[in-house]
Image (cartoon, grey):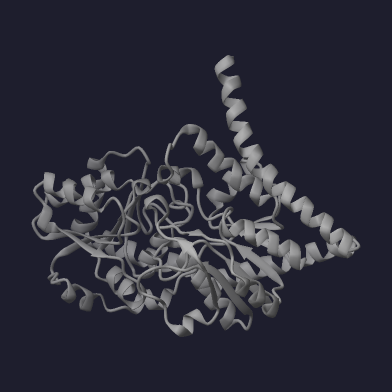
Amino acid sequence: MNICMMTNTYLPHVGGVARSVSTFAEEYRKAGHGVLVVAPQFEGKQPSKRSEAMVERVAALQNFNGSDFSVRLPLAATLSARLDAFKADLIHTHHPFLLGDTALRIASNKNVPIIFTHHTRYEDYTHYVPLDSPALREVAINLPTHFANLCDGVIAPSESLAKLIRQRGVTVPIKVVPTGIDVKSFATADGARFRKKFKISPRTFVVGHVGRLAPEKNLVYLARAVALFLKQTTDAIFFVVGGGPSEEQLKKTFADHGLSERLILAGKQTGRALHEAYRAMDVFAFASKSETQGMVLAEAMAAGLPVVALNASGVREVMRDGLNGFMLPASASAERFAKHLARVRTEPRLRRAFERGATATAQDFSREHCAALALEFYEEVRKATRRERLETHFSPWSAMLQRLSLEWDLISTRTQAVVSVVFGGREAKAS
């Protein structure tokens, strides 16, 4: 099968969607499938020529409104030529806008099925857009819902998100497929080497965190909770891997508590360095309430780490309270969070039990297993859409009508999302 994956964010960008796309692309190729990734150009360090062999880059504006995302510019003719040569059997888009619109048009033109991965709750990211408002958040909910229903199938990275988008009105087939992780690489990484690099003593207890440092990750809460824990002991630090706009807020919180020297910011890490970073930790702390899948939690567990986290979507798919760590109520105080970090440190038997539970849980998220689930769904969708296409005479005339219908649907999708907010809001005020 030839699979074309279209995404607004990809390597060398460091983030959940970029890692998800690259992970699945690599596994598909290992399984003997053809893969073409269409993604924006990014500034800075470029991936290896080997990894770029299956990538077609499109021109883009970088760091849209201070975010990590890029906005693509008009597509070059080289993309059309490469797509013609590639002969995709299926298009897989990872966003409902920008290259998502392009993916729909290509699938229609090529008469092939299209899958959409609903990676996130887009309403949690409206603060990156000027004039953020409740109305904009509602558009961010409605638009991907309408977009999903223009596709032939939808992948949700967790059951929590699958349930949510069904409630919002997605009617096409939905398959839950987490992003797979390289379990063996995390389990065997050299954490001691990473500690040595950052001059962390083998005896120091390391509270770790990995992720984008952004407002939607609830980092103010997490920083306060970890700071409260650190005040109880002199031989522990907070070790953070990642970067983003909330980095200065983290520094300020620790400075306010007089703990600046016990906060280590390691920046963005990838590949072997990321695996070693996890293994350098003793416990993984996580407070985000905006996740659609607990990818970093699964990675932490593959590294054998117990986890302390808040009960939220994406988290509860990975966490087993009392088995692989502590999953606290979403409303838990920072003091309570700190208390459970202390329990992991001071109760060795409990910690070892959590480590065993974490290692067992990670097996359910292996990249090989998750890629197999996605490929099964591809085949199901291809068979279903093939039957539909056989029932419809596909001539140049019907192709033109189908394209006109798609363009109307794309316009209608955005119009419905906006009108439902504007007029719905007016009706609410009038009542």
Q: In the figure, 385 relative to 313: above or below?
A: below
Percent position of residue 121, x then y: 50, 47
User: From where the camera sits, is residue 261 visible?
Assistant: yes
Is residue 175 visible from the viewing direction of this image?
Answer: no
**Relative height, residue 304 to residue 134 (above, below):** below
Q: Percent x, y for residue 380?
A: 73, 65
Quarter of image, res 382: bottom right
Taking the spot 25% from the left edge, 62% from the top edge, the residue there is 349
Farthest residue, direction top: 431
Where residue 119 appears, as percent x and y from the top left, is: 52, 56
Residue 260: quarter of image: bottom left
Left or right: where 178 falls relative to 88:
left
Which residue is more in the foreground, 188 or 256? 256
| Image coords of residue 180 (percent x, y) | 50, 68
Residue at the location (27% across, 43% down)? 221
The residue shown at (48%, 52%) is 292
Which quadrant of the figure contains the N terminus?
Answer: bottom right
Q: Which residue is drawn at 64% across and 62% down?
A: 103
Q: Is residue 311 above or below residue 319?
A: above
Quadrant occupied by the C terminus: top right
Relative depth, front residue between 77 and 205:
77
- Tally of numbered tags: 0
Nearest the eye: 228 or 420: 420
